[in-house]
Image (cartoon, grey):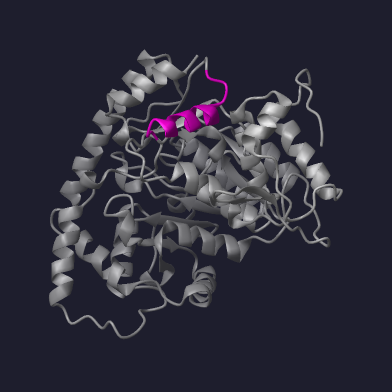
């Protein structure tokens, strides 16, 4: 098949990926043929099972392998006319979500320090129940579709909430969506074409990265720092690649928890104006931030910025209500695209969210969540530091801590071991634009209250 060189400076994972890509591209492995099992390959080449798992994950993500439950990995059919984009896969498929489904989003696991949501008892359950009871007594029309842009009273409320953040919009500039994920998907499909250079946070938001790869974008990572962005690297990448758009999360970013300073926001907008690209601001954790801060949208007033947020993180993930705000012309295009791809969003869910938001206890609930998160941050950081972890930054707000242990080389290996102990971890490669191996882990502080998690970490880090 092919051989590996342990002495090579090229990591073994990359050697495995490149080896399979070559024999698939030259026809030595035909579409539909079965790849060696993970354990077979590991035994034959005398490498770690976790190294092979990491390589096979990447081959699935790049569209070379397909994973079939209980059957193994098979070579995917790749059209002969496809034009390869260096470093990317134009035939990227939803099989890349295999990793998310199998490990990262496994809600069945008992302990979830790597997940991306708040515990159920942290959410506004009582407000949702009260809103649901109100809806049950209202004469809600269930026989038709809702407004294309979404439930008008909720759009007006979003307008008012944005005004509090010094973002001046009309309700006609607000589009309600099926969560922030649909909002980002609509924007990506409207703005991005195969081969386009797109700036993204590095590390960044996995669902967005998967979506952009599927569209054939060339992902250009902008390194995050504890204070925001590596501004030198940002400018170099802008000059070299001339991106069409920058997808970024300035505030309480996932996975790092970092908050971009005001000077960094100004620099992003200066570069956007000078080099003519748009900026998509993902601000889904704004409600969790106890500090009033400027946003890219407040600096730009939706000239070049498209603003995205959601109520899923604080009301309930299950109601799936998000929104975006943009300049009028672009907003109309996105509304049309929303109609084409899925007609309207759920007016029932939007009414449910609206009822919760106008509940008199909503702001008190948010204040309580912020206070719980601040305590959880303090406790989680202390426990991680006590067992040798280095924290990227300590925001004391939001959901996440981004950390590594000096003795841990590959967090993916640890994540697979954790699954066997009923623990879900967030390995760093999942957040990498290049799916690179990483020693870093994302910790959700709201789920870091179980002693078993830290006992596992202590026992399994060399």
Q: Is residue 414 magenta?
A: yes
**Residue 375: percent from the left, percent from the top?**
24, 29
Looking at this view, name the residue that lies furthest to the right. 26
Left or right of 222 on screen, residue 150: left
**Residue 329: percent from the left, percent from the top?**
53, 72
| Residue at figure coordinates x 25%, y 39% from the top left | 370
| Residue at figure coordinates x 87%, y 48% from the top left | 26
| Residue at figure coordinates x 39%, y 64% from the top left | 169
Which of the two residues, 213 or 454, is positioned nearer the viewer here?
A: 454
Is 447 above or below relative to 295? above
**Residue 216: percent from the left, percent from the top?**
68, 56
Corner quadrant of residue 381: top left
Q: Is residue 175 magenta?
A: no
Left or right of 87 on screen, residue 182: left
| Residue at figure coordinates x 50%, y 36% from the top left | 263
Is 143 above or below relative to 180? below
Which of the two residues, 25 or 277, is positioned nearer the viewer here?
A: 25
The answer to whether residue 278 of the structure is visible from this angle is: no
Range covered by the magenta-colored residues: 408-423
């Amino acid at each position: 098949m092919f051989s590996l060189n342990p002495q090579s400076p090229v990591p073994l994972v990359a050697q495995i990926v490149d080896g399979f890509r070559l024999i698939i591209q030259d026809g030595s492995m035909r579409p539909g043929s079965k790849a060696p099992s993970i354990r077979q390959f590991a035994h034959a080449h005398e490498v770690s099972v976790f190294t092979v798992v990491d390589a096979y994950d990447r081959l699935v993500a790049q569209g070379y392998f397909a994973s079939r439950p209980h059957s193994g990995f098979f070579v995917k059919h790749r059209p002969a006319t496809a034009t390869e984009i260096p470093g990317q896969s134009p035939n990227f498929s939803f099989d890349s979500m295999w990793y998310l489904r199998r490990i990262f989003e496994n809600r069945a696991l008992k302990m979830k320090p790597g997940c991306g949501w708040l515990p159920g008892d942290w959410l506004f359950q009582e407000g949702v129940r009260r809103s649901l009871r109100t809806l049950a007594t209202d004469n809600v029309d269930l026989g038709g579709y809702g407004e294309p842009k979404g439930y008008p009273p909720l759009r007006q409320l979003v307008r008012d909430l944005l005004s509090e953040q010094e973002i001046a919009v009309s309700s006609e500039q607000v589009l309600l969506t099926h969560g922030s994920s649909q909002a980002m998907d609509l924007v990506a499909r409207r703005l991005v074409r195969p081969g386009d250079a797109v700036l993204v946070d590095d590390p960044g938001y996995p669902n967005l990265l998967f979506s952009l790869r599927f569209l054939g974008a060339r992902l250009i990572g902008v390194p995050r720092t504890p204070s925001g962005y590596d501004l030198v690297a940002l400018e170099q990448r802008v000059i070299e690649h001339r991106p069409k758009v920058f997808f970024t999360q300035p505030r309480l970013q996932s996975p790092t928890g970092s908050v971009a300073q005001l000077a960094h926001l100004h620099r992003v907008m200066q570069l956007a104006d000078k080099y003519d690209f748009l900026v998509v601001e993902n601000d889904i954790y704004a409600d969790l931030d106890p500090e009033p801060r400027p946003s890219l949208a407040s600096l730009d007033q939706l000239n070049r910025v498209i603003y995205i947020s959601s109520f899923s993180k604080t009301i309930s993930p299950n109601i799936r209500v998000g929104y975006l705000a943009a300049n009028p012309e672009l907003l109309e295009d996105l509304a049309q695209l929303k109609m084409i791809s899925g007609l309207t969003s759920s007016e029932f869910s939007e009414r449910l969210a609206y009822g919760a938001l106008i509940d008199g206890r909503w702001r008190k609930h948010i204040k309580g969540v912020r206070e719980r998160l601040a305590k959880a941050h303090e406790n989680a950081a202390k426990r991680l530091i006590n067992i040798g972890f280095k924290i990227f930054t300590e925001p004391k707000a939001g959901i996440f801590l981004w950390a590594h242990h000096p003795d841990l080389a590959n967090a993916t290996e640890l994540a697979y071991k954790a699954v066997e102990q009923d623990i879900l971890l967030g390995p760093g490669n999942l957040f990498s634009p290049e799916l690179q191996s990483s020693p870093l882990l994302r910790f959700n502080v709201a789920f870091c209250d179980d002693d078993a998690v830290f006992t596992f970490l202590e026992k399994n880090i060399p």
